[in-house]
Amino acid sequence: MKRFVCITAIVLTTLTVLLIGTVLIGINNNYVHQTVLSRVNTLIPGTITVGTIHISLLTMKLEIRELAVADSSGRKLAGFKRLLVDISPGALIHRKVIIQEALIDNPRVILDTDSTGQLTLLNALVKPDTTPAETVKKPQGTSKPFQIELHKFNIQWRVNTIFST
């Protein structure tokens, strides 16, 4: 009986280490990111492209570089050079998401309207023939799973002056 328990413990520990290793390797794998992005792009009329994504589970940091949102014709409508989100890992134990710092570097957006008066950015993200989902009533007495706090939010602008004559 002791031998069975020992072997079971070794197998479970090995499987746990392999699972954690796979998650840590896969979470920063470019193939995984592109697969997720391609799935998202099938759900929207436009496209979202990303240069790189780096996720650190140990320090709870997310960094996305060179994100762009384009409409169905490929015209870039919005994006940023870099997004950095730093989350406090200790607060998750207390069901809190504390964002120590959120930084958006060089955001850009083009707010044009099409012939129907709709913002072109919205048309890149939402299919025109879709209707909003029915409102789901939340049962009374339920709370949010996590309380979210944002401590510091920065936007770094790089202003490009364009002169027209």
Image: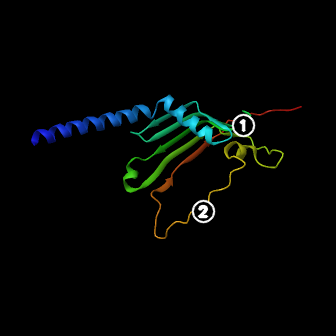
- Using residue 52 as the reference point, say whether residue 159 is left or right of it: right
Callout 2 crowding tier (Cα within 10 Å): few <14, some 14–19, many ≥20: few
Between 163 and 47, the one nearer to me in the picture: 47
Q: Amino acid at mark 1?
A: Ser
Q: Position of residue 154 (x, y in %)?
A: 58, 44
Quarter of the image where one finds residue 111: top right
Q: Mark 2: which amino acid?
A: Thr
**Left or right: 106 as drawn, with respect to 19:** right
Please, what secondary structure does the residue beneath circle 2 have? Answer: loop
The answer for how far apart the CA atoms under marks 2 and 1 are is 29 Å
- Residue occupying image coordinates x 34% and y 37%: 20
Task: State the image coordinates of residue 116 (x, y, percent, origin top left).
Answer: 82, 48
Q: Residue at x 74, y 41 (%)?
A: 110
Q: Position of residue 100 (x, y in %)?
A: 48, 47
The answer to whether marks 2 and 1 mark residues whose Cβ atoms lie closer than 8 Å is no
Mark drawn on residue 118: none
Relative horizontal placement of residue 120, taking residue 62 as reference (left or right): right
Please tell me which residue is depicted at 49% across the width and 55% down the height of the picture: 148
Residue 52 lies in what quarter of the image? top right
Image: 141 above or below 31:
below
Say which label, 2 or 1, has the lower sequence index. 1
Quadrant location, the N terminus: top left
Q: Quadrant of the C terminus?
A: top right
Q: Quadrant of residue 14?
A: top left
Give the residue pinned by disc 2: 135
Which residue is the extreme one toward the bottom?
140
Which residue is tagged 1?
72
Assess disc 1: are there few (<14), some (14-19) or many (≥20) residues with their C-alpha within 10 Å of its C-alpha: some
- Locate residue 2 relative to residue 23 in the image: left or right: left
Colour pattern of the rendering: rainbow
* Residue at the image position 32 percent from the left and 33 percent from the top: 18
Dot 1 falls on a residue whose secondary structure is loop
